[in-house]
DNA sequence: CGACTTTGACCAGCGC
DNA sequence: GCGCTGGTCAAAGTCG
């Protein structure tokens, strides 16, 4: 297996946004030649400029803790995206509502494969061609019931060996399948986090 | 047969 | 206002 599992938000019980302990400056190599770099929300707004910037993951945007879904959305929040539609309409962010962004955390990994096995189960719900990139961006959602975590996976056209994985949201459940490699990565990333 | 992927369409935000 | 782009939906197809 030539996969690499970067860090991702997991909120078991701590009120602290999971990504808060991701404020790391990480560039390291792993057992399969994968290297990871974390990016902040601000940098995520400029995907084309991801490479080469000083990485740090943050939750400076309004986090899950502050998301205030409408009453109807509260009623069926399990397994559904907060912006998802019920019925025929497609609901995105409503007009007049302030744009609420979940904390995002992106990792640049050097890997042969696009799909990084981070131990969670993901369902692909979309794929889009991205401007200035010959590779499409894939959209995944955590399949665990009640977990709204999403991730985007995109390979850089500049460097085909680099995969940028963007995590959005916080896992509300434990990892489904852990791997020694992944735990090793986690340990390293936490070390980096404490140092930087 | 359930879980998952593919893919075209739809919608909102943003820049010009 | 219009067109471009990103993000999402959902039906159809695929796979184990």
Image (cartoon, coloured by chain):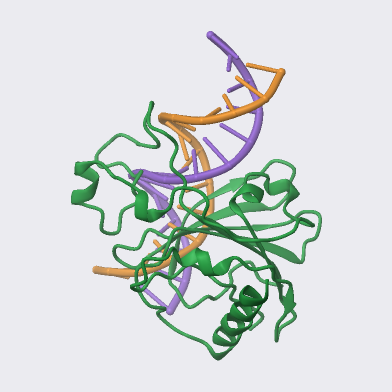
Chain colours: A green, B orange, C purple
Seen as rendered, the residue at the extreme bottom is A180
| Image coords of residue A142 (percent x, y) | 41, 64
Tell me what residue is drawn at x 35 percent, y 63 percent.
Answer: A147
Quadrant (top left/top right/bottom left/bottom right) for the N terminus of chain A: bottom right
Residue B15's x, y, as percent? 67, 25
- Which quadrant of the figure contains the C terminus of chain A? bottom right
Name the one closer to the observer, A127 or A68.
A68
Does residue A71 appear left or right of residue A55 in this picture? Answer: left
Q: Position of residue C3 (x, y in %)?
A: 63, 20
Left-right relation of A121 to A13: right
Query: Number of callouts in the render?
Result: 0
The quadrant in which residue A170 appears is bottom left
Relative to A174, does residue C9 appear above or below in the rendering?
A: above
The answer to whether residue A140 is visible is: yes
Q: Is residue A126 left or right of residue A83?
A: right
Question: Which residue shows up at 55% across the image and 91% down it?
Answer: A180
Residue name at image x 34 percent, y 45 percent? A84
In percent of width and height, residue A52 lies at 79, 57
């Amino acid at each position: 297996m030539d996969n690499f599992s970067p860090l991702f938000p997991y909120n078991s019980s701590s009120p602290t946004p999971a990504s808060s302990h991701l404020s790391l400056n990480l560039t390291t190599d792993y057992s399969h030649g994968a290297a990871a770099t974390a990016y902040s929300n601000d940098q995520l707004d400029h995907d084309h400029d991801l490479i080469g910037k000083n990485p740090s993951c943050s939750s400076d945007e309004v986090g899950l803790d502050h998301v205030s879904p409408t009453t109807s959305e509260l009623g069926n929040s399990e397994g559904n995206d907060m912006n998802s539609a019920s019925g025929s309409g497609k609901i995105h962010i409503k007009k007049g509502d302030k744009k609420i962004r979940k904390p995002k955390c992106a990792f640049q990994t050097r890997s042969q494969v696009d799909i990084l096995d981070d131990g969670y189960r993901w369902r692909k719900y979309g794929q889009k061609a991205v401007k200035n990139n010959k590779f499409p961006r894939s959209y995944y959602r955590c399949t665990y019931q009640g977990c709204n975590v999403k991730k985007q996976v995109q390979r850089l056209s500049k460097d085909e060996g680099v995969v940028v994985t963007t995590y959005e949201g916080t896992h509300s459940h434990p990892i489904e399948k852990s791997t020694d490699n992944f735990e090793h990565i986690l340990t390293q990333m936490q070390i980096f986090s404490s140092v930087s």
